[in-house]
Image (cartoon, rainbow, N blue to C red):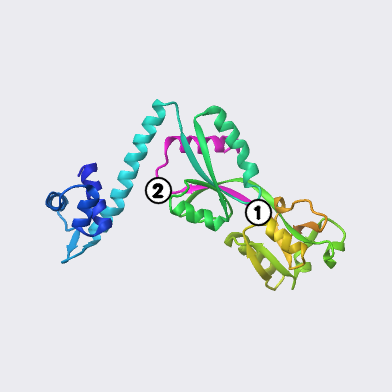
Amino acid sequence: MNLRTLHYFVTVAEELNITKAAEKLHMSQPPLSSQMKLLETELNTVLFIRGRRHLKLTESGQLLYRRAKEILSLADKTSAEIRSMSEGMTGTISIGLVEGMAPDIAAEWFEGFIKEYPGIKFRILDGSTDDLIEKLRGGIISLAVIAAPCDNSLLNSFRVGTEKMTALMSREHPLAAGKGREIKISDLKDEPLIVPSSRSVIELVYKWFRKIGTEPKIVCEMDSYLDAAALAGRRVGISIFPRTAYVPNDSLISKDIDAEEKNLEYLFVWRKGHPLPTIEERFIDHVKAEVNI
């Protein structure tokens, strides 16, 4: 069961047709069929249910497909890492950053890491926490900074920062005239709210309102902080976003949320059970050192 045979098997498992798989592998059909039968003999199991036109993976075949993908991916990454080490650590780190304070937090990490490894580049993707978790699942990014909480069965994580949640409202709104820089949740009862389209933040908002015996009146969920501020300025509702969402604007007032759990936590995360390239592991170690972990 060598890497070439696993590559053949993965191709057949994805095409579920020996003829199409052989064409994709640029080989003839009989040798490919023989390789699959030899693999079944070696493993003492049946990997495919053979129909007239299509194949179907057995339970053993499904398990081998998952493991073969991981083995081939690890082999590719290992080869790339060895080449990278011989070239003095080069490559691109793909990382997702949730809107808010995350870009500011990460900027210092990038600066220090690039100084240490000048051959490294960063590919940065933004989005909501839910979007970034999907990108992690799909392998589009390897690392991310998201808003807490997260699924600890899926992700490794550690805290990298906190930020106060803020209510943005039009200067013409009656609540804008209140004294002080904070606003109570009870003041927001029955007010139309604009919130980030993030499950974790929405759950936090619902938690605030449950403590006063009611539910929030959410009229809009959106990703863009600037758009949320614009809607607040036009009195569509009050926007509940992290403090960094506020851009000084003559038409808006910003008031910090006065609640027991008023801070948003930022987490650095990566998938469990998925080996990372050496350079990404070193970046994780670099971030841990920056936040004193």
Q: What amino acid type is highlighted by mark number 1?
A: Leu
Q: Is residue 112 left or right of residue 52?
A: right
Q: Is residue 275 magenta?
A: yes
Q: Which mark is residue 190?
A: none
Range of magenta residues: 265-293
Q: Position of residue 292 (x, y in %)?
A: 60, 37
Relative depth, front residue between 105 and 208: 105
Say what secondary structure mark 1 lies in: strand
Relative depth, front residue between 8 and 279: 8
In the image, residue 258 above or below residue 237 = above
Relative depth, front residue between 199 and 206: 199
Say what secondary structure mark 2 lies in: loop
Task: Answer with mark 1 or mark 2, whichever residue precedes in sequence.
Answer: 1
Q: Quadrant of the N terminus?
A: top left
Disc 2 crowd, CA 10 A, few/some/many (<14, 14-19, 20+)? few
Residue at figure coordinates x 62%, y 60% from the top left: 201
Q: Position of residue 71 (x, y in %)?
A: 30, 45
Q: Position of residue 268 (x, y in %)?
A: 55, 46
Marks 1 and 2, how far apart in space?
27 Å
Q: Quadrant of the C terminus?
A: top right
In the image, residue 158 above or below residue 130 = above
Residue at figure coordinates x 81%, y 58% from the top left: 253
Q: What amino acid type is highlighted by mark number 2?
A: Gly
In the image, residue 119 above or below residue 291 = above
Q: Which mark is residue 273?
A: 2
Residue receiving disc 1: 264
Residue at figure coordinates x 70%, y 67% from the top left: 193
In the image, residue 189 above or below residue 58 = below
Q: Position of residue 269 (x, y in %)?
A: 52, 48
Q: Is residue 164 left or right of residue 34?
A: right
Q: Is residue 238 magenta?
A: no
